[in-house]
Image: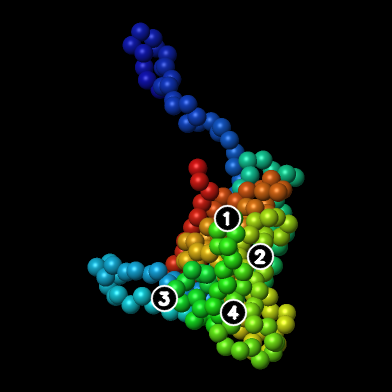
Amino acid sequence: MFWNKKSSVPTPVPQPKGLWTIDKELWTIDKEFRFDYGHRVHNQRLNKEYSIVDDCVCKHLHGHGGCVHIYLEADELEGGFVTDFHHLNWVKHFLDAHVDHKFVLDVNDPWFSNIINGKPIWVATPVGSVLAGLEPTLPLNTTDATELHLREVYVPGTDHRVGWELKVDDLQGPEREFFEGFFLVKFVPTSENLCKWLFDAVEAKMSLINVHVSKVSWNETPKSRAVYSRPV
């Protein structure tokens, strides 16, 4: 309020539009998932002035106790819900099947063949070279096969591909246990890239019921976290 010199009645001070009004309501829910996984950041580089040490230990084969939070949002509620939390049960199944106790490996890692004990088999297609399988560098003991084929992995109920796994149906014992422990991707599996990877995977599924992901956070340790948010 301010006083008008020509009147004893205070005149309201004009307020910026929308300052005291709600143009749009928004609700957010989130759910946490925990799992263990391994990876290698083959392109790690450090600036010693900032890092103090110059040991690129993330280039080692190593693992983490991962913790992710998936945030869903809606500007309208359906029966009082953004969505039922049970509608994220598929995410737990997805992570358990393809990430938990798996080694996430970039197919372009320069040490790919050494890590997975197999030479990549690339096949030319109209859209570029595609990794079709592996030629084991050591003879397999439980099968006569000379190559291992890949299975494309998709988000259930969608055509959104998230990576590849080796077909191990013909393998047994330690050989099967070794090769089924890899999940192959086409990016360096940093927490930042994995965060975006999971965001896109969950969005592909949840958008089918008109629910959208607002952000995903990915903790590779209790003190280190990456967050990817929906572009605005």
Find numbered disc 2 in the image and state the secondary structure of the residue it sits on.
strand
Task: Give the left or right position of residue 156, taking residue 6 as reference.
Answer: right
For image coordinates 36% across by 17% down, the residue present is 3
In this view, which residue lies farthest toward the left?
49
Residue under label 2 = 153
The CA span between labels 3 and 1 is 31 Å
Q: CA distance from mark 2 to mark 3?
A: 26 Å
- Picture residue at 41% right of the left edge, 74% below the top: 58
Eye-nearest disc, 1 or 2: 1
Q: Position of residue 148 (x, y in %)?
A: 64, 78
- Give amino acid for label 2: Val
* Residue 135, disc: 4
In this view, the residue farthest toward the top is 6
Residue 182 x/y as whole percent: 59, 76
Q: Are marks 2 and 3 in contact (CB under 8 Å)?
A: no
Does residue 156 lie above or below 82 as drawn?
below
Residue linked to disc 1: 127
Indicate how the structure is coloured in the image: rainbow
The image quadrant where one finds the N terminus is: top left
Which of the pair 36/98 is nearer the observer?
98
Picture residue at 73% right of the left edge, 79% below the top: 169
What amino acid type is highlighted by mark number 1?
A: Val
Query: Is 44 on the left-hand or right-hand side of 152?
Result: left
| Residue mark closest to the camera, 3 vs 4 | 4
The part of the image, by quadrant, that contains residue 224 is bottom left
Q: Which residue occupies 38% across, 69% down?
A: 44
Q: Earlier in the sequence, mark 4 or mark 2?
A: 4
Q: How many marks?
A: 4
Query: In whole angstroms, how far apart are the C-alphas of marks 1 and 2?
Result: 19 Å
Residue 165 visible in image:
no
